[in-house]
Image (cartoon, rainbow, N blue to C red):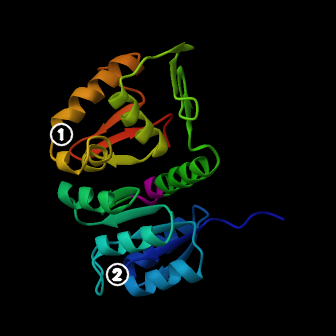
């Protein structure tokens, strides 16, 4: 018997957008369960057991960022924000709250479907192998505390290792400046973004074949960094 298609919980108050997404994503093989308010979304997350959540920030009853926090407290479900809010501060706030990805309206259902597939792959990877990252000539084994490039071990400073370990555990996803600074340097340093620029530059020189054109350690301008092994 074939496995059922992944189920998306769509939390969006605009009926036309829900119809468009249901038709568009249905054509890519996704199943959709809809919620028009934040409270309905929270209830559906418990009752429907979705594989992923698509969430609009502009809901009539609950603040979208607060809803992200509530969903994240309840589960590790991948959450993709789909919003007309395009300011960097909105992206950062949502990602810091626990969202996994952020897309701005208008959008193509093809790109959205690709992002969702990437989130599902990452969720499976974390469940089965969250301590390992391997791509091309780069291999990072957190269980062994070992980083290798082209078969040779790379020596990292303690801070460099803590940064790369955080990125490995969130491989494929954006990790915000604030998240990285808080975890590696502590809550008193969440505004010291120059620390990150220095250490990420050092990591690229040690791990990338061409630090000026990184393949693995990508910058999400104004938001954070992402560790990738391949295109979604």
2 shown above or below 139: below
Q: What residue would you read off at disc 2? A: 14
Q: What residue would you read off at disc 1? A: 193
Magenta segment boundaries in residue numbering: 108-112
Residue 62: x and y, percent? 30, 82
Looking at the rendered structure, the secondary structure element under dot 2 is loop
Is residue 119 found left or right of 219 in the rendered image? right
26 shown above or below 193: below
> Could you tell me what secondary structure mostly forms the magenta stretch?
helix
Q: Give the image quarter of residue 84.
A: bottom left
Q: Residue furthest toward the right? A: 1
Q: Residue drawn at (75%, 64%), measured in percent from left and top?
A: 3
Q: Residue drawn at (34%, 23%), measured in percent from left and top?
A: 204
Magenta stretch encompasses residue 109: yes
- The quadrant of the rendering that contains the N terminus is bottom right
Residue 91: x and y, percent? 26, 58
Is residue 148 found left or right of 61 in the rendered image? right
């Amino acid at each position: 018997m074939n496995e059922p298609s992944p189920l998306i919980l769509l939390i969006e108050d605009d009926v036309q957008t829900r119809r468009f997404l249901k038709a568009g994503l249905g054509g890519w093989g996704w199943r959709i369960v809809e919620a028009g308010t934040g409270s309905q979304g929270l209830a559906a997350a418990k009752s429907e057991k979705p594989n992923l959540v698509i969430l609009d920030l502009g809901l009539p009853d609950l603040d979208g960022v607060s809803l992200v926090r509530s969903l994240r407290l309840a589960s590790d479900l991948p959450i993709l924000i789909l919003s007309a809010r395009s300011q960097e501060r909105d992206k950062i706030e949502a990602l810091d709250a626990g969202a996994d990805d952020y897309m701005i309206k208008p959008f193509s259902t093809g790109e959205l479907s690709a992002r969702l597939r990437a989130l599902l792959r990452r969720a499976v990877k974390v469940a089965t192998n969250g301590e390992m990252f391997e791509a091309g000539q780069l291999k990072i084994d957190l269980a062994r505390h070992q980083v290798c490039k082209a078969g040779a071990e790379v020596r990292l400073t303690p801070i460099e290792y803590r940064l790369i370990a955080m990125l490995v555990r969130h491989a494929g996803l954006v990790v915000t400046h604030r998240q990285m600074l808080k975890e590696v340097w502590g809550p008193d340093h969440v505004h010291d973004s120059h620390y990150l620029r220095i250490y990420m530059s050092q990591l690229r020189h040690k791990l990338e074949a061409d630090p000026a054109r990184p393949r693995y350690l990508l910058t999400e301008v104004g938001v954070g960094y992402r560790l990738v092994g391949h295109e979604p």
